[in-house]
Image (cartoon, helix red, strand yellow):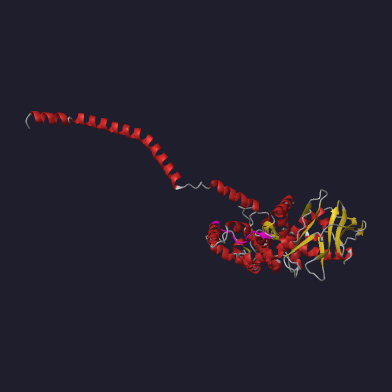
């Protein structure tokens, strides 16, 4: 086992790298220059940055959403334990903690959850800054954490909590370091070189394992999502600085003069002023004025586009994520094809992260009195593919025709059992009752009788009106009188 001093050494060794990674992600990283002259100049003057590291990280993070947990039972799903886990998850704002873990995983290469039991006996868990946690894995089982330490501040005093797995259980101890000299709490939290002393003997806990859960992008190394393109980001920043200076120079170009005149008259001149320049003496070079040309802004802009395209290719991030109009006019299928490398990468991460979430779920259930193993828990992430509503509906209908129940499909999509039960209840409520032929005929007869009662008076009134109108028209035309007169005249 490691001593606390050795854990502090391991912790200090990674803090610097994590600081740099978070500076890139938060867009606070200074542009990096190869020459000391430029480095000194830009450290003293305003500079520009165009940060794409957050795009690379968030492209992955935004598609990593935990939909649901389920607990297996001998005859299917253990609804009681699943509901209990959902309650613990919601009580601890699990979705928010998971999002923070995913952010740290891709911004630094690792993230942590520290779990425990509150005084009321309820399980709790919180995401932790990876710069404040150090873990040690077993030599015989590389997936088992046998020792961990959390470094934190109690007011102005550095503190550490350490957990160690022994043959008879997990032990916890608290240690105290010196007071911090930092005025910034964030900087004090990650201060290095602290010496700690024990507050007392380690105390045996009831935890089934060390209560620290380690999430990693890769088991081989701890590096951020963008580690392969950090030099490209530096180049983008330098190019962007050059673009900014070129734009300023284009607006106010540097001018030059070959003359014996006092140059202050040029420096004091304002727009619209006329400057009198004395002629050169005979035999001397004539007075000459000019200005330096502006840089080709299109060339610099094209260089930036090239850097961004390289970054997209190396990190498997779709290029349209870096451009406002890059995916305009594309169909859903074309969009899915463009995102397939990113989706493949996220699917790989989900396979790596899910078992750790399942370990956490088993832990919190066990400490609340419902013994559970990680093998019984299933963590379901949302499908990272861009989902089209019409495509999803079509896929469900096709699966139902193939014999796959829609409830099973919804469960695989992450719907909770309570959601599915409510859906079935609503469907029954909205479905019209089935009727046999006799009942339908009775309804038709009643409708016919009702229509007859309503329509007959209206028809009679309409026919009477038509008859009256016809008689009036016949009287007005005097057709009857003419016919009678014809008969009387023998015609």
Q: Quadrant of the N terminus?
A: bottom right
For the magenta stretch, what is the residue range? 379-389
Observer-nearest residue: 138 or 46? 138
Q: Where is residue 17 shown, x and y percent of the image?
A: 78, 65
Q: Where is residue 114 shown, x and y percent of the image?
A: 79, 57
Q: Is residue 412 magenta?
A: no
Examine the rendering and report whether any part of residue 23 can be seen: no
Examine the rendering and report whether any part of residue 414 can be seen: yes
Q: Quadrant of residue 354?
A: bottom right
Q: Where is residue 403 shown, x and y percent of the image?
A: 55, 61
In this picture, residue 188 sits left or right of residue 353: right
Observer-nearest residue: 166 or 224? 166
Q: Quadrant of residue 385?
A: bottom right
Observer-nearest residue: 70 or 288? 70
Taking the view exactly as shown, the residue that stands out farthest to the left is 490
Q: Is residue 388 magenta?
A: yes
Residue, x 9% and y 28% (percent of image)?
488
Observer-nearest residue: 347 or 324? 347
Q: Where is residue 483 shown, x and y percent of the image?
A: 13, 31
- Secondary structure, magenta segment, majority class: loop
């Amino acid at each position: 086992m490691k001593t606390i001093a050795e854990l502090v050494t391991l912790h200090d060794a990674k803090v610097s790298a994590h600081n740099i990674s978070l500076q890139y992600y938060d867009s606070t990283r200074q542009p990096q220059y190869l020459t000391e002259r430029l480095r000194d100049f830009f450290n003293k003057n305003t500079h520009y940055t165009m940060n794409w590291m957050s795009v690379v990280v968030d492209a992955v993070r935004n598609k990593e959403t935990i939909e649901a947990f389920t607990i297996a039972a001998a005859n299917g799903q253990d609804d009681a334990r699943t509901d209990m886990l959902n309650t613990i998850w919601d009580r601890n704002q699990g979705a928010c903690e998971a999002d923070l873990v995913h952010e740290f995983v891709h911004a630094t290469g690792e993230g942590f959850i520290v779990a425990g039991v509150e005084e009321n006996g309820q399980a709790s868990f919180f995401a932790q800054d990876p710069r404040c946690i150090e873990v040690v894995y077993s030599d015989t089982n590389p997936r088992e954490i046998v020792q961990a330490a959390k470094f934190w501040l109690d007011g102005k005093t550095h503190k550490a909590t350490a957990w160690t797995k022994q043959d008879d259980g997990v032990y916890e101890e608290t240690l105290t370091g010196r007071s911090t000299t930092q005025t910034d709490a964030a900087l004090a939290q990650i201060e290095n070189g602290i010496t700690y002393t024990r507050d007392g003997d380690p105390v045996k806990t009831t935890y089934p394992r060390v209560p620290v859960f380690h999430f990693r992008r890769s088991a081989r190394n701890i590096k951020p999502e963008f580690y392969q393109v950090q030099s490209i980001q530096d180049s983008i920043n330098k190019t962007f600085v050059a673009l900014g200076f070129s734009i300023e120079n284009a607006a106010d170009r540097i001018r030059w003069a070959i003359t014996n005149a006092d140059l202050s008259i040029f420096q004091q001149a304002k727009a619209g002023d006329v400057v009198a320049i004395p002629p050169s003496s005979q035999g001397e070079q004539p007075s000459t004025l000019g200005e330096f040309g502006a840089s080709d802004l299109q060339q610099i802009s094209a260089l930036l586009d090239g850097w961004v395209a390289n970054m997209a290719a190396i990190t498997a991030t779709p290029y349209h994520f870096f451009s406002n109009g890059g995916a305009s006019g594309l169909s859903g299928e074309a969009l899915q094809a463009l995102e397939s490398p990113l989706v493949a990468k996220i699917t790989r991460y989900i396979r790596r992260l899910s078992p750790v979430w399942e370990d956490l779920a088993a832990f919190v259930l066990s400490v609340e009195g419902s013994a559970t193993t990680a093998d019984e828990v299933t963590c379901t992430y949302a499908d990272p593919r861009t989902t089209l509503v019409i495509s999803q509906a079509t896929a469900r209908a096709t699966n139902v025709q193939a014999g796959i129940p829609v409830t099973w499909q919804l469960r695989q999509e992450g719907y909770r059992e309570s959601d599915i039960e409510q859906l079935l209840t609503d469907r029954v409520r909205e479905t019209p009752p089935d009727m046999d032929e006799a009942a339908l005929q009775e309804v038709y007869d009643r409708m016919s009788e009702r229509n007859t009662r309503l329509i007959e008076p209206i028809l009679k009134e309409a026919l009477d009106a038509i008859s009256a109108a016809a008689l009036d028209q016949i009287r007005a035309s005097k057709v009857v009188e003419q016919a009678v007169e014809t008969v009387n005249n023998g015609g």
